[in-house]
Amino acid sequence: MKIVIIGNNVAGTFTAQNIRLLNEAAEIEIFTQEKYPYYTRVRLPELISEKVIIDDLIVFNEEWYKNKQIKLNLNKTVRRINPKTKTLELEGTDSLISYDKLVLALGSTPNIPPIKNAVKFRDEHKGLFTLRSIDDCLEIKDFIRKEKAKNAIVIGGGLLGLELANQINNSGLDTTVVEFFPRLLPRQLDMECGAMLREEIENKGIKVVLDAATEEILGNGSVTGITLKGGEVIDADIILIQAGIRPTINLAKDANLDTNKGIVVNAYLETSEKDIFAVGDCIEYNNQIWGIIPACMEQSKIVAASVLGLKKVEYLGTIPKNTLKIMGLDLTSIGMIDPSKDTLEQAPGGWDILKKADKKNCCYQKLVLKDNKLKGAILFGDTKAISYVNNKMEQDVDKNELRKLLELYIYKCQNCGKEYDEAMMEILFKDLPENFKCPNCNGPKKDFKQKE
């Protein structure tokens, strides 16, 4: 059986590895337009600041592919898929590539919001860039050097946007982050934790502008800045947009596969065409796309089994999860982290939040429960609860056990019995001012004792 995979990203590479783990005899061939074997995109911004070199980013070198008996074809762009004849056409050649099973790991492209002149400046290489590949990094780095850029704007305050801003700032440029939403990391943090992160970022000398819609890219021969909705102008010599992703679906669409936002798949990651599968950032399942590494890893195991006819496990979706360092600060964000009004209306009752905000030490821990089941968590600046959270997601938990884990205490006024529950308060008891008075009997702070 010949299995062809288009795409050498995390989804494509781990699909190949998982197929090989399940079957030693299958012929596996990967085609990618990349110049490099599989590399991590998470650390791409560090290439701009020269914190790393290209070799540091390579996860699996070409020897790894040879040892796994996986044929890797670099610099090969697939022009067309022919499902009826089970062949692929490559750019620059008339020869056809045949397959028995085909896996589309087409990945995604950076999303560019509807900002006037953005696409034009990007396509003409006039100082506006998106970041998705090693070549993008090299182009950005070269532009900064040649143009002697001094001011940078990063549009997008998500994970990659913030790390990109950090490395651009480390390269000696005055850097401003412009975020459409009213907080940084809108998918990973709530408002309170987002405010703590903003303060830390601004302490590093990076400006942050929130709740800001970019309307126009300014410039003639090259970019000179942006105009925000409301008229404010921010100057820049280079602009970088990191505003989410769009699934890559053109090949699938041209081959008449079902597509919507992504390539539509079923629970076994099968497309609408027999013997063609899809995995990773490019797929849409149950009207949802994921675009996160944990989803790619989980899907790669399922699609590997499906390709080999071992359809035992269905894909049920992936709980959003990120564990990483953001500007040197540890962050884990998993599951439902901020139940909105809509969420509470759709699933009312039984919601509990335990929270510890230590603003002096930039630590924030929040656990979200529904009917005593752990549904989500934010762990920022303190990692000791990570293993517990990972093991207990979607399981019943003991609130007293969680209090001990987060070191959250209840302090009781010895005069009137009034309790100060740290899990329900914005400020830890130790951080209350010394002139704090009991809200019930007006007794002094020293009259509160920690409950056992």
Image (cartoon, helix red, strand yellow):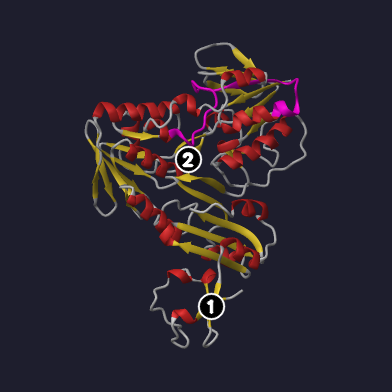
Please give the count of numbered marks on the rendered protein.
2
Q: Which residue corresponds to the image point at 45% horizontal and 85% vertical from the top-left?
A: 443
Drawn side of residue 212 relative to residue 1, left or right: left
Q: Which residue is mark 1?
A: 449
Query: Helix, strand, or loop for circle 1?
Result: strand
Q: Quadrant of the C terminus?
A: bottom right
Which numbered tag is attached to residue 432? none
Residues at circles 2 and 1 in contact by the CB criterion of under 8 Å:
no
The reply to whether residue 353 is visible in this rendering is yes
Q: Earlier in the sequence, mark 2 or mark 1?
A: 2
Q: Nearer the viewer, residue 82 or 88?
A: 88
Which contiguous range is marked in magenta? 19-44
The x, y position of residue 400, in whole percent, is: 64, 68
Task: Using the numbered discs, state the Cα–Cα distance from disc 2 to disc 1 in whole angstroms.
Answer: 51 Å
Residue at (59%, 47%) from the top-left corner? 287
Left or right of residue 342: residue 123:
left
Q: What amino acid type is highlighted by mark number 2?
A: Ile
**Residue 270 can be seen in this image:** no
Residue 279 location in percent, x, y?
Answer: 62, 35
Give the vertical position of 99 relative to 311 (above or below): above
In front of the other: label 2 or label 1? 1
- Image check: 235 left or right of 48? left
Q: Residue furthest front?
A: 446
Magenta segment, prevailing SS (helix, strand or loop): loop
Helix, strand or loop status at disc 2 = strand
* Foreground residue among 411 and 68: 411
- Per the image, is 24 magenta? yes
**In the rendered image of this protein, does residue 106 appear above or below residue 387?**
above
Q: Which mark is residue 245?
A: 2
**Percent of width and height locating residue 26:** 73, 21
Vertically, is 239 above or below 343?
above
